[in-house]
């Protein structure tokens, strides 16, 4: 008579008992999050291990973080790493092993070590930087000279971002009255589609690159967990090779992205990006002013020296006349006249240079734009830059070079 064997449920029961006997306590496991979804407050993951050589999966298992635990681990992980728990991250999790007669083997996530993930993220960033250095492009954008003045600004941002409005308000309200010409190029600034969207926007700017002096990438107003898009190798590669300086103000205080590392200039917030541009123009203005004062000082000193020379020449003439050296006195007087003519000519040349410098300074002021035929329109005392938001009945005031005209929006 043959052995009838054991039932499947007996076998799975023995497997479950063996697992409970050997894995009674949580085990720390290193793995990559291959899939992740949240449903009903619970987090369902697929954890995998990949071969370093072939990038093929060598191990895979389902894992679940139940809602009571997930509510605690999620904010803890995001605050510590600055990253959202998502597919593609390397994690170190404490799990208990469970075996169900019907659903098979699964892992229950009890804890997570954010320090491990931070180390993996830092290693990934270093790997990207090393690749950019190996490509010979890591510092290309940093080496570009910042145009002087940099007033034509292409902005990459979400059109609804609070940071974009902060940036524009800071430029418009600068205390020096500098005029900036800003154009928004809308892009997705968070999520998986952010990097491709920003790259496409850079291509759009490149099509008319001669119209701009600088590119500003603004993100402000989002969560720090959305910074993963700015650690993209493809985005960094496009930024390093862009022909205009890139200023990054993607609104974070505690972390540095790959984009920050390769951009020409990196600041913490969109407002700081605006202040950088204002400060850059202010430095140029101060250099022009200093040059003007320096020229004035040099030629004032030179004029004094020439006057002293003239005075000494006059004394020599008097002495010659006193000694009845008329011919010698005539010669000296003629030399003095030539010297005076040379001084006057030199002064006239320098006055022309000063006038040219003054005209260049005037061209940077809003008053110059009015004189050239430009107009400014305001609503409730604020300058309009777009027709969006206007409605019938709004009272507008338009300033011309010779006065102002009030009007009303009809349609």
Image (tube, grey):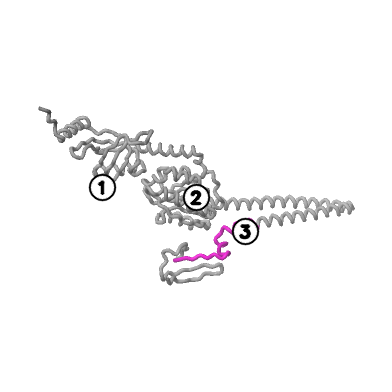
Q: Is residue 304 left or right of residue 259?
A: right
Q: Is residue 140 left or right of residue 109?
A: right
Q: Residue furthest front?
A: 1
- Compared with residue 197, is residue 15 higher up or lower down, i.e. above or below? above
Quadrant containing the C terminus is bottom left
> Tag count in the figure?
3
Spot occupied by residue 346 in the image (x, y as percentages of width and height)? 73, 54
Q: CA distance from mark 2 to mark 1?
A: 45 Å
Say which residue appears at 21% left-offset and 36% top-offset.
98
User: Residue 39 — which label?
Assistant: 1
Q: Is residue 266 left or right of residue 286?
A: left
Q: Nearer the viewer, residue 143 or 79?
A: 143
User: Residue 94 — which label?
Assistant: none
Q: Is residue 41 left or right of residue 11?
A: right
Q: CA distance from mark 1 to mark 3?
A: 67 Å
Magenta-highlighted residues: 355-379
Spot occupied by residue 8 in the image (x, y as percentages of width and height)? 16, 35
Q: Nearer the viewer, residue 341 or 258?
A: 258
| Image quadrant assignment for residue 3 | top left
Q: Are marks 1 and 3 in contact (CB under 8 Å)?
A: no
Query: Which residue, given by chain and number where applicable, does mark 2 sit on?
Result: 276
* For discs 1 and 3, the disc positioned in front in the rendered view: 1
Query: Which residue, given by chain and number where applicable, does mark 3 sit on?
Result: 359
Q: CA distance from mark 2 to mark 3?
A: 25 Å
Report crowding for label 3: few under 14, some 14 to 19, many 20 or more residues within 10 A (C-alpha): few
Q: Nearer the viewer, residue 137 or 399?
A: 137
Secondary structure beneath dot 3 equals: helix
């Amino acid at each position: 008579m043959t052995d009838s064997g054991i039932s499947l449920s007996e076998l799975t029961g023995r497997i479950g008992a063996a697992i409970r006997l050997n894995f009674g306590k949580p085990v720390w496991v290193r793995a990559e999050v291959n899939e992740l979804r949240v449903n009903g407050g619970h987090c369902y993951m697929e954890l995998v291990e990949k071969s370093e050589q072939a990038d093929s999966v060598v191990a895979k298992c389902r894992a679940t973080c139940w809602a009571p635990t997930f509510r605690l681990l999620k904010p803890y992980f995001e605050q510590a790493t600055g990253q959202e728990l998502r597919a593609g991250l390397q994690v170190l999790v404490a799990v208990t092993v469970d075996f169900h007669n019907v659903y098979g083997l699964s892992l229950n996530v009890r804890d997570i070590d954010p320090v491990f993930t931070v180390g993996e993220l830092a290693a990934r960033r270093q790997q990207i930087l090393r690749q950019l250095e190996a490509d010979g492009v890591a510092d290309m954008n940093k080496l570009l000279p910042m145009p002087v003045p940099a007033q034509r600004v292409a902005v990459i941002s979400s059109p609804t971002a609070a940071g974009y409005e902060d940036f524009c308000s800071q430029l418009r309200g600068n205390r020096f009255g500098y005029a900036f010409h800003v154009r928004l190029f809308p892009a997705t600034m968070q999520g998986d589609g952010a990097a491709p969207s920003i790259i496409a926007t850079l291509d759009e700017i490149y099509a008319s690159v001669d119209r701009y002096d600088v590119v500003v990438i603004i993100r402000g107003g989002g969560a720090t967990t959305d910074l993963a898009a700015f650690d993209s190798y493809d985005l960094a590669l496009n930024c390093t090779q862009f022909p205009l300086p890139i200023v990054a103000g993607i609104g974070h205080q505690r972390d540095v992205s790959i984009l920050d590392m390769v951009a020409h200039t990196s600041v913490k917030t969109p407002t700081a990006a605006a202040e950088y541009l204002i400060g850059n123009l202010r430095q140029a203005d101060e250099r022009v002013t200093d040059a003007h004062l320096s020229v004035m000082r040099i030629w004032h000193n030179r004029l004094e020296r020439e006057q002293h020379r003239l005075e000494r020449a006059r004394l020599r003439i008097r002495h010659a006349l006193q000694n009845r050296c008329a011919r010698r006195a005539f010669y000296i007087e003629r030399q003095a006249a030539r010297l005076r003519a040379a001084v006057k000519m030199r002064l006239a040349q320098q006055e022309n240079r000063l006038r040219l410098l003054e005209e260049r300074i005037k061209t940077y002021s809003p008053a110059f734009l009015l004189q050239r035929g430009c107009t400014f329109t305001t609503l409730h005392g604020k300058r309009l830059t777009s027709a969006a938001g206007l409605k019938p009945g709004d009272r507008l005031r338009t300033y011309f070079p010779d006065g102002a005209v009030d009007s009303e929006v009809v349609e």
